Amino acid sequence: MIDLYQDTEIETMDREALEALQLLRYKRTVANALKTPFYKKRLNSVGIKSAKDLKSLPDIKKIPFTTKEDLREAYPFGLMASKKEDVVRMHASSGTTGTPTVIYQTQEDLDNWTNLTTRSLVSVGCHKGDIFQNMMTYGLFTGGIGLHYGAEKLGMLVIPASSGNTKRQLQLMKDFESTVVHATPSYMLYLYSKLEEYGYTLSDFKLKKALVGAEPHSEEIRQKIEKLFGIDAYNSYGLSEMNGPSVAFECEKKAGMHLWEDSYYMEIVDEDTLKELPDGKTGELVLSILIRNATPILRYRTRDLTSIIPGQCSCGRISRRISRIKGRTDDMLIINGVNVFPSQIEEVIMKMPEVGTNYRILVKKEGLLDRLIVQTEVGPSIFSDDARDMNALKKRIIDNLRASITISPTVELHEPGVLPVQEGKAIRVVDERGGSK
């Protein structure tokens, strides 16, 4: 018999018991945070000098918000609360200035994260005997490796395929009879578009479920994936600052994502006033992590827009659910599941002496995938030289951008004066995907 819950006691405890657990874990997190210079100064400024000063959950509102800029300023070790010799893992994500935001984890932290990813997999009906093909990127990005460990703990056979190489992905799916895949929704659609080209039909596969995340997508996209493949597709949410995958996950009811409240304290605030909003109202998601020793983060402004779904899920889990992420409060672009800030591109190309002062970033949809195009003006001498020089410059720009944003854009070189110039604020980004930013 397949268990409905990975941890029945935690997942079905009553609300009063859950809130008591949250307060206990929040106090422990505050005690860890006070070990760091950043949080010691910030918490002391509002009268919190020890965990005992946090008497109830409403006291959390006294704590100032933490932002991505705070994490960048703390780079590289400013938010490490554990001894360096006790830290066994680090992950990082790039920010708008190019300075990464870094998180550290002890072995206990990793075990806690693994428990959550296992819980998430169980919540969508995965079990021992499933064959799990992970098509998310591995490395400093948390997307791939997070669910990897949870799947192994559950007893699934894990294929760490990572991203890309579509022909190989389809071959692995067929040869090893993958039953569950983890990928971005856009890549799932791209996979389907390549079946005929590579000589496959749906009857060649044993696929039952797709876990999709890393980029916002509509209910219509989920339904399209399900219809095309004849499978169930489940939405999920995570961010590296909160460990990565399995901050929130759908269950088999597909009625919103359960945010695992025993491990994360959630608030939804108005992005302008920063006042907390009631259930059902869309605002910015603010999170505090309750299960990590090495890098405690309190009241983190995620910039992601969502709402709390009123009422309890019919699956019986007590954790409240959040709706699909509706977008972000900043200007981040999501290109095939990869987060890209326009200022990262500007930082790279403006360091190159051959590049002029005007550039433009275009994002288009070509088929089922996003295409990033960087147009930049260069000195007139470039166009009078051998074409090999232009090609060499293009290659250097692409290589430099790939090192910063991890994907390879198309680069177009133009003579000075070709790209449009605005009298007011420059329009650097043109997203032609119809609101899919």
Image (cartoon, rainbow, N blue to C red):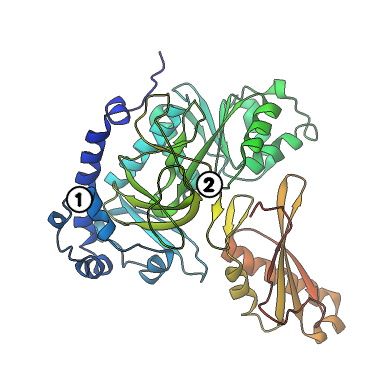
Q: Is residue 239 shown left or right of residue 180?
A: left
Q: Which one is in front in this view, the residue at disc 1 or the one at disc 2?
A: 2
**For the view shown, which residue lies furthest in the top direction?**
1
Occupied quadrant, residue 361: bottom right
Vertically, is 379 above or below 156? Answer: below
Residue 40, percent across and down? 22, 67
Please report whichever mark, 1 or 2, sits nearer to the chain's N-terminal start: 1
According to the picture, the residue beneath numbered tag 2 turns out to be 325
Q: Nearer the viewer, residue 276 or 30?
A: 276
Mark 2, Cα crowd under 10 Å, few <14 / some 14-19 / many 20+, is: many
Vertically, is 103 above or below 368? Answer: below
Which quarter of the image is occupied by the N terminus? top left
Amino acid under label 1? Arg
Q: Is residue 208 shown left or right of residue 258?
A: right
Residue 152, percent across and down? 42, 32
Name the residue rendered at 37%, 51% in the picture: 287
Q: Nearer the viewer, residue 268 or 362?
A: 268
Q: Is residue 384 shown left or right of residue 331?
A: right
Question: Alpha-carbon distance for marks 1 and 2?
Answer: 29 Å
Name the residue rendered at 14%, 60% in the picture: 50
Amino acid under label 2? Ile
Occupied quadrant, residue 63: bottom left
Name the residue rendered at 50%, 65% in the picture: 95
- Judged from the image, the secondary structure of the residue bearing numbered disc 2 is loop
According to the picture, the residue beneath numbered tag 1 turns out to be 28
Vertically, is 398 above or below 199? Answer: below
Residue 412, percent across and down? 78, 69
Q: Nearer the viewer, residue 239 or 114?
A: 239
Q: Is residue 120 shown left or right of residue 165?
A: left
